[in-house]
Amino acid sequence: MRGIGDSELTERLWRQGTDALSEAELLELLFGERAPGCRSELEALHLGGLKALFELDPHALASLPGMGPRRAGRLLAAVELGRRSLRLT
């Protein structure tokens, strides 16, 4: 990650839209401030993309270094909101 601050990502999101942000940047916004040395979600993106990250068992997701149950819960909630929104259309 380039080290862009949360406020800069938020500004870009509002100015250019969500398509202007990478998957890693969207995850950084979702999680808020990244814990020092937390690269697990970014590594998972490189290993198989978002699909690979989302296909992990919730316990396996939470056990990734730097993820933990709170971040895994946020990610799972965001994924479920996306799934439900697709059912509405």
Image (cartoon, grey):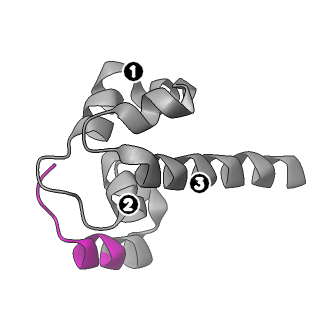
Residue 40 picture location, percent across and down: 27, 36
CA distance separating discs 1 and 2: 20 Å
The alpha-carbon separation of the residues under discs 2 and 3 comes to 11 Å
Left or right side of 39 for 85: right
Of tags 1 and 2, the one toward the viewer is 2
What's the residue at 61%, 46% (across, down)? 79
Residue closer to the observer: 55 or 49: 55
Residue on which disc 1 sits:
48
Residue 9 visible in the picture? yes
In this rendering, the answer to whether 13 lies above or below 38 is: below
Kindly identify which residue carries mark 3: 78
Q: Secondary structure at mark 3?
A: helix
Q: Which residue is mark 2?
A: 31
Q: Could you tell me which residue is drawn at 34 percent across and 49 percent down?
A: 22
Depth check, front residue: 59 or 27: 59
- Image location of residue 53, percent across then percent down: 45, 30
The amino acid type, in three-letter code, at marker 1 is: Gly
Left-right relation of 85 to 21:
right
Task: Judge whether 86 appears above or below 9 on screen.
Answer: above
Residue 37 lies in magenta, yes or no?
Answer: no
- Mark 3 and mark 2 in contact (Cβ < 8 Å)? no
User: Is the Cβ of the residue at disc 3 closer than 8 Å to that at disc 1?
Assistant: no
Magenta highlight range: 1-11
Q: Which label's residue is closer to the chain start, 3 or 1? A: 1
Q: Residue at x 23, y 75 (%)?
A: 8
| Circle 1: element type | helix
Mark 2 vs mark 3: which is more N-terminal?
2
Counting residues from the start of the chain, the first of labels 1 and 2 encountered is 2
Q: Amino acid at mark 2?
A: Phe
Looking at the image, the residue that sits furthest to the top is 47
How packed mark 1 is, by other alpha carbons closer than 10 Å (few <14, some 14-19, many 20 or more), is few
